[in-house]
Amino acid sequence: MRLALTALIFLFGLFDLFMGLNFLFTPAETAAGFGLSPVGTQGLSTLRADFMAFFGVVALCMMIGAWRRNADLLLVPAALMGTAVTVRALSLALDGSYPSWRLPMTVEILHVVLLVSAWRVLPHHKIEELTS
């Protein structure tokens, strides 16, 4: 069970890393798939910085947490993805739906379920262990 969870987390982390790298190297093309369009170089800079930061932090925490079997590192991406899916649900209620709304929410929900499940199964590291 632990091995399967660790492998899945690592694969999801790779997916997120590639999403971040896509925003870093081809921000306009990648943003179009999200329904976004940058306005000038400031828009490109914002896409690169914000989306690479989001997906990069999610990916690194997941991959390092899986590699080291440190469940506590999985709480960061779980919180980020949980926040994203919660705000998407709020946006659905306030703004209405759009044709492809299910896909990003499904991906985010899968992340949260996987990460919280793994957090419950994988070992937790005490603060003393991390500082020594």
Image: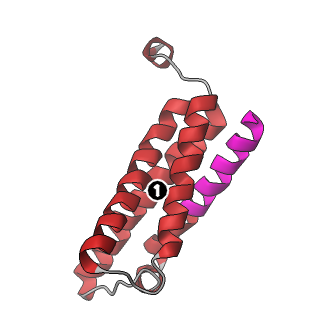
Name the foreground residue: 19 vs 96: 96
Q: Determine the main secondary structure of the stretch shown in magenta.
A: helix
- Element assignment for label 1: helix
Residue 128: image location, x then y, percent: 45, 11
The structure residue drawn at horizontal position 62% and vertical position 56%, both measured from the top left corner, is: 12
Residue density around tag 1, few if under 14, some if 14–19, many if 20 or more, within 10 Å: many
Q: Which residue is mark 1?
A: 56
The structure residue drawn at horizontal position 25% and vertical position 87%, both measured from the top left corner, is: 39
Residue 124: image location, x then y, percent: 54, 23
Where 55 falls versus 93 (above or below)?
above
From this viewpoint, is residue 70 visible? no
Amino acid type, mark 1: Gly
Residue 119: image location, x then y, percent: 55, 34
Where 43 falls versus 109 (above or below)?
below
User: The N terminus lies in which quarter of the figure?
Assistant: top right
Q: Quadrant of residue 86?
A: bottom left
Q: Magenta segment range? A: 1-16
In the shown orientation, is residue 22 left or right of residue 91?
Answer: right
The structure residue drawn at horizontal position 51% and vertical position 57%, both measured from the top left corner, is: 109
From this viewpoint, is residue 115 visible? yes
Where 111 falls versus 25 (above or below)?
above
Residue 78: image location, x then y, percent: 46, 46
Give yes or no for residue 95 being in the magenta stretch.
no
* Residue ranking furthest to the front: 93
Name the foreground residue: 82 vs 48: 82
In the shown orientation, is residue 9 left or right of residue 41?
Answer: right
